[in-house]
Amino acid sequence: MFSRRTDWNLAPNRLTKAVEQLRQAGTRIFDLTISNPTRSGLSYDHAAILDSLRNMESLDYDPQPRGLLSAREAVTDYYRRRGETVDPGFLVLTTGTSEAYSFVFQLLANPGDEILVATPSYPLFDFLADLQDVKLVPFSLIYDHGWQIDFHTLEQAISEKTRAIVLVHPNNPTGSYVSADERVRLNDLCAEHQLALIVDEVFLDYPHDDLHRSSFVCNNVALTFTLSGISKISALPQMKLAWIAISGPDAHRQAAMERLEVIADTYLSVSTPVQWAVRNLIEQRKTIQPQLLNRIRTNLAELDRQLRQQNACARLAVEGGWYAVLRVPAIRSDEELAVDLLHKCGVLVHPGHFYDFPQDGYLVLSLISRVEDFREGTSRLLKFFKT
């Protein structure tokens, strides 16, 4: 009755079952996996956000496949303030980056074609690829005093069916940005094999060192689709607005835009009130991002302080984003370890296999957890490895 593309194993895993059991029992859980900024104790300008949705223009339906020009110009203003020039004519608004990925996969790949994606990476890609009948082929990020693209595995992964390379800049969960040298090599590979780049930049504005990291929106060597949105930029995931910025050689960019416009026109999914509000919603980053960066840096400093007091676990280098990766003793599978930590310590973490780490011994922690929860949860976690 159902399609093969949805033939997933839908049974809850052991960690999910354990969380549900403890919550039903009323047990206190120190959640070090939180990714929802609206539930992490941030101070939002409620009046400004809600007032931005009270626009009479929202009562008129003006279906524009790329999105309303005023909304696209608000996005270009965001990039202009970062020192990057984006043509609003080469922007397409979507309800989120998940939809943006779907649009780009539909644009580039026939059923059975291949998209290359780095590992470790976010597991959502698997579902998006399944729904578009695209095959994901992994290449490696390797760790050596920091994360780098393993170009050997990347080049080996390229085949006649390869259509694009997906990058997350900075990566989730490794927090590593694509370096300038890596950009050059990526562009060379794309030119050699006629590949596109798909670059997810939702965490771009969250460097841990105050250094400016350039976007890919001005990458004009390879055909490039840069994805971002207000879910992370302004910590407003419920407003459901993201975008695709197209750059690259003019002929390829124009052809991509024309086809992408037809795809977007088929769905016309972006809410009109949110489009009229987007300029004000993007402005919210000015108050939200400092709070998040302070939270991230405070929690990271606390993690390092506690790590210095023991020698069983270590933190891997991280340059940006909302997560930290711990290297822990591989005394059992990461899933078994996460379940044990939950039952014995009341601490919820993501096991490394959730992000396709190649071996056991990795845990992923959210750095946007409330400071007091992060401090206590981390303390309990590290004490677990002393016993």
Image (tube, rainbow, N blue to C red):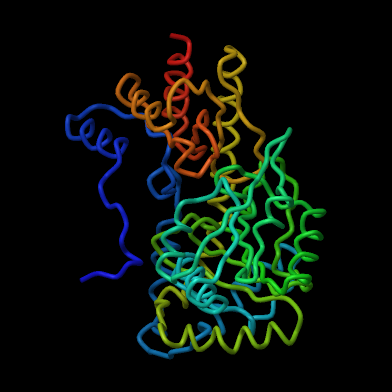
The quadrant in which residue 174 appears is: top right
Rendered location of residue 93, percent (x, y): 52, 76
- Taking the spot 46% from the left edge, 19% from the top edge, the residue there is 379
Rendered location of residue 178, percent (x, y): 71, 52
Please state, as top left, top right, bottom left or bottom right, where the N terminus lies in the image. Answer: bottom left
- Taking the spot 64% from the left edge, 54% from the top edge, the residue there is 169
Rendered location of residue 96, percent (x, y): 46, 67
- Taking the spot 50% from the left edge, 36% from the top edge, the residue there is 364
The quadrant in which residue 250 appears is: bottom right
Asked whether, in this view, residue 355 is left or right of residue 209, the answer is left
Please state, as top left, top right, bottom left or bottom right, where the C terminus lies in the image. Answer: top left
Residue occupying the far left of the picture: 25
Q: Is residue 358 above or below residue 205?
A: above
The number of callouts visible is: 0
Asked whether, in this view, residue 373 is left or right of residue 109, the answer is left
Q: Is residue 172 above or below residue 8?
A: above
The quadrant in which residue 248 appears is: bottom right
68, 147: nearer the viewer: 147
48, 13: nearer the viewer: 13
283, 259: nearer the viewer: 259
